[in-house]
């Protein structure tokens, strides 16, 4: 390898572009962001296609960084994973979700389950189920109200650890959803080996429905697969009425996406829920 040289400060090379500078800024700020209350949960409801009612809602994390503005989780979640902060962040989300569910009970708000996203790293680490149990008990929340969304990356490596953790969650009575389904590289056989309640079809498939040839067939096959394995199925990223109609014709249970509702703040979500009740 070429010698870098004793006096070269890699950090200030002119090649350092705006993106990596932003990355560095985020990294140094992420650490203290939890303490500084810079995170907020947004909520995006899921709609039942049979009844048109709200079946549940997904919590999506937002970071209000004082100087950088609102940062997308697509940017900071991978950083938090790299920096070893993801478990703390997930736990913060889990606790907020339990508080929120306790609120729902006080308010008599019956909006089905509240789903949170959990990182593969957290699942592997082996304390997810015990953390979930502790917080559910602490906030007096029924496990059936909580849903955990996981991606296939959880099972590519460390299969047995991930399975053990999922079994423990299932035993508690928590609902388990496999997120971004269809985008991973793992074999389908794991579907029968894990206690999965719901398959969520990745938005990239929904985006090409119903126009693109071959794509609709995949979506249709996933729905059939889910049903034959006694799983529920959710389509994410539904933006258009044609997509909704097509999914309905394929007997997809549930949809989520901008067509029904964007991710919104807690106050907006309470208002949305009230408005749906009155329909
Ligand atoms: P995801 O779990 O697949 O979430 C769906 C993403 O699609 C969300 O992006 C949501 O805002 C967006 N979305 C929803 N409906 C539509 C639609 O109709 N059209 C389009 N184009 N997009 C739609 P978001 O909120 O930016 O989150 C990105 C990813 O970050 C999530 O993907 C999830 O993997 C991760 N994430 C978000 N919150 C958390 C969290 O609390 N913990 C962890 N570990 N990961 C999170
Ligand atoms: Ca998700
Ligand atoms: Ca997803
Ligand atoms: Ca995703």
Image (cartoon, rainbow, N blue to C red):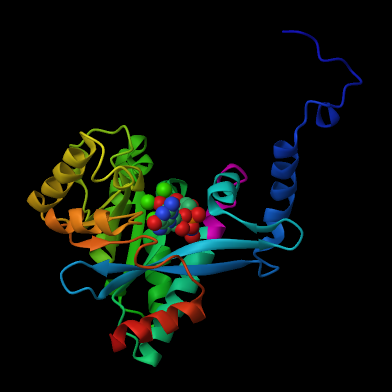
- Vertical position of residue 121 compared to residue 278: above or below: above
> As drawn, is 160 to the left or to the right of 62?
left
- Vertical position of residue 34 compared to residue 136: above or below: above
Q: Which of 23 and 209 is in front in this view?
A: 209
Residue under the point 69% across and 55% down? 31
Residue under the point 86% across and 15% down? 5
Q: Nearer the viewer, residue 263 or 62?
A: 263
The residue furthest left is: 228
Can residue 87 be found in the magenta stretch? yes
Can residue 162 be found in the magenta stretch? no
Pick the quarter of the image with the C terminus. bottom left
- Vertical position of residue 140 compared to residue 143: above or below: below
Q: Position of residue 37 (x, y in %)?
A: 66, 70
Q: Which of 229 and 128 is in front in this view?
A: 229
Q: Can residue 118 be seen in this view?
A: no
Residue under the point 83% across and 27% down? 14
> As drawn, is 270 to the left or to the right of 47?
right
Give the quadrant of residue 278: bottom left
Residue under the point 31% across and 39% down? 159
Q: Nearer the viewer, residue 206 or 66?
A: 206
Pick the quarter of the image with the N terminus. top right
Please provide the residue range marked out in magenta: 81-89
């Amino acid at each position: 390898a070429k010698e870098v040289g004793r006096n070269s400060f890699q950090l200030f090379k002119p090649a350092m572009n705006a993106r990596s500078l932003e990355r560095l800024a985020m990294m140094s700020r992420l650490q203290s962001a939890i303490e500084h209350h810079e995170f907020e949960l947004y909520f995006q409801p899921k709609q039942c296609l049979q009844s048109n009612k709200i079946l549940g809602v997904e919590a999506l994390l937002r970071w209000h960084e004082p100087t950088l503005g609102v940062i997308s989780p697509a940017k900071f979640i991978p950083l938090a994973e790299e920096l070893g902060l993801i478990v703390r962040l997930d736990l913060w989300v889990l606790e907020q979700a339990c508080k929120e569910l306790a609120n729902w009970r006080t308010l008599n708000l019956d909006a089905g389950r509240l789903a949170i996203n959990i990182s593969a790293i957290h699942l592997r680490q082996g304390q997810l189920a015990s953390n979930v149990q502790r917080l559910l008990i602490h906030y007096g929340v029924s496990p059936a109200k909580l849903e955990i969304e996981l991606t296939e990356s959880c099972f590519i490596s460390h299969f047995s650890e991930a399975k053990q953790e999922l079994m423990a969650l299932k035993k508690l009575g928590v609902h388990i959803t496999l997120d971004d389904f269809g985008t991973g590289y793992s074999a389908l056989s794991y579907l029968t080996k894990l206690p999965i309640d719901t398959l969520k079809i990745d938005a990239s498939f929904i985006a090409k429905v119903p126009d693109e040839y071959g794509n609709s067939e995949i979506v249709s096959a996933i729905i059939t697969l889910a049903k034959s394995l006694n799983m529920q199925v959710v389509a994410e990223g539904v933006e258009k009425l044609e997509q909704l109609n097509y999914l309905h014709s394929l007997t997809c249970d549930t949809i989520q996406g901008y067509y029904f509702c964007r991710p919104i703040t807690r106050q907006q979500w309470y208002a949305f829920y009230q408005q749906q009740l009155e329909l």
